[in-house]
Amino acid sequence: ISLMDAIKSPGWPKWQESIEREVMGLVMMDLWDEVPRSSVPQGQRVNSGHFVFKLKCEDGKFTKCKSRDVFEGHRSVAGIDFMGTLAHMAALKSVRTVLALGAPADHYFMNFDISQAFTFSVCEREVYMELPPLGKMGITNIGCGRGRESGYVAKLKRMLYGQRDSGRKWEQLLDEFFLKIGAVPSTIDSKIYTWSFNGFEARFAIHVDDIL
């Protein structure tokens, strides 16, 4: 649904609460600097953003409203706003192999879903984005920072969902981490890592922001 649909809906208070949580989380993560619109270099585009809304359910029952502030990357220009978008994931047959090797050995399996994964990557280019329209949404919490109505814009310090190269930057960050701790990528599938530590061995299969 769109922002206007959410505002007009009977469930708007819950959507409003979820938007507030999202924006506060991004501000606490130091995702951007708020700078005056007048300070944006001439010819530099201020990109748009919007909220994506999702109802979360478990066993067919509503649990909570989830909102995510995303960058409108479909307007980005290759070679100017980003250089590459290719990001690899572990192949399904590779994941099956990890499970097949671990099950007979009675290995313990865990799945990690990394929240806001893409926002951990540094935004290396000079990218500006409109701040969320807090006034329009009736959000006055100072923890959400200034809104779009303030005359300020966001200068991104970290990547945001929707940027064309956000997945690639996340992959590079994750690869750096695994190599730093001494994990070794498979020669068959580079998104399968083996890590040996103090006599223990662990294997990791990477699928976007999920790690098995």
Image (cartoon, rainbow, N blue to C red):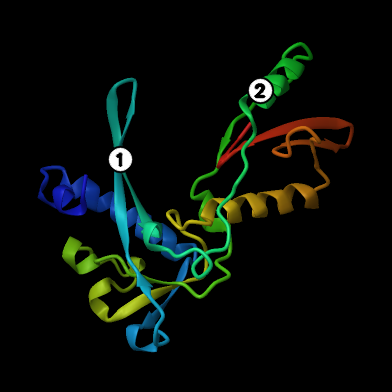
| Residue 45 versus residue 180 in the image, above or below | below
| Residue 93 versus residue 203 in the image, above or below | above
Residue at 50%, 70% in the rendered image: 80
Residue nearer the viewer, 57 or 156: 156
Quadrant in the rendering for residue 212: top right
In three-dimensional space, the C-alpha distance between marks 2 and 1, rounded to whole angstroms, equals: 31 Å
Mark 2 nearby-residue class (10 Å; few <14, some 14–19, many ≥20): few
In the rendered structure, the answer to whether residue 112 lies left or right of residue 18 reads right
Circles 2 and 1: CB distance less than 8 Å?
no
Residue nearer the viewer, 167 or 197: 167
| Residue 37 versus residue 105 in the image, above or below | below
Residue 98 locus on image (x, y percent)? 72, 23
Residue 77 locus on image (x, y percent)? 45, 65
Residue 108 locus on image (x, y percent)? 70, 22
> For the residue labelled by badge 2, is the local secondary structure a helix, a strand or a loop?
helix
The N terminus appears in which quarter of the rendering?
Answer: top left
User: Which mark sits nearer the N-terminus, 2 or 1?
Assistant: 1
Residue at 32%, 69% in the rendered image: 131
Q: Residue furthest right?
A: 199
Residue at numbered disc 2: 93
Residue 190 locus on image (x, y percent)? 73, 39
- Checking the image for residue 54, the label placed there is 1
Residue at 53%, 57% in the rendered image: 165
Between circles 2 and 1, the one closer to the viewer is 2
In the rendered structure, the answer to whether residue 164 lies left or right of residue 130 reads right
> For the residue labelled by badge 1, is the local secondary structure a helix, a strand or a loop?
strand
Residue at 72%, 15% in the rendered image: 100
In the rendered structure, the answer to whether residue 64 lies left or right of residue 122 reads left
Mark 1 nearby-residue class (10 Å; few <14, some 14–19, many ≥20): few
Q: Residue furthest top?
A: 104
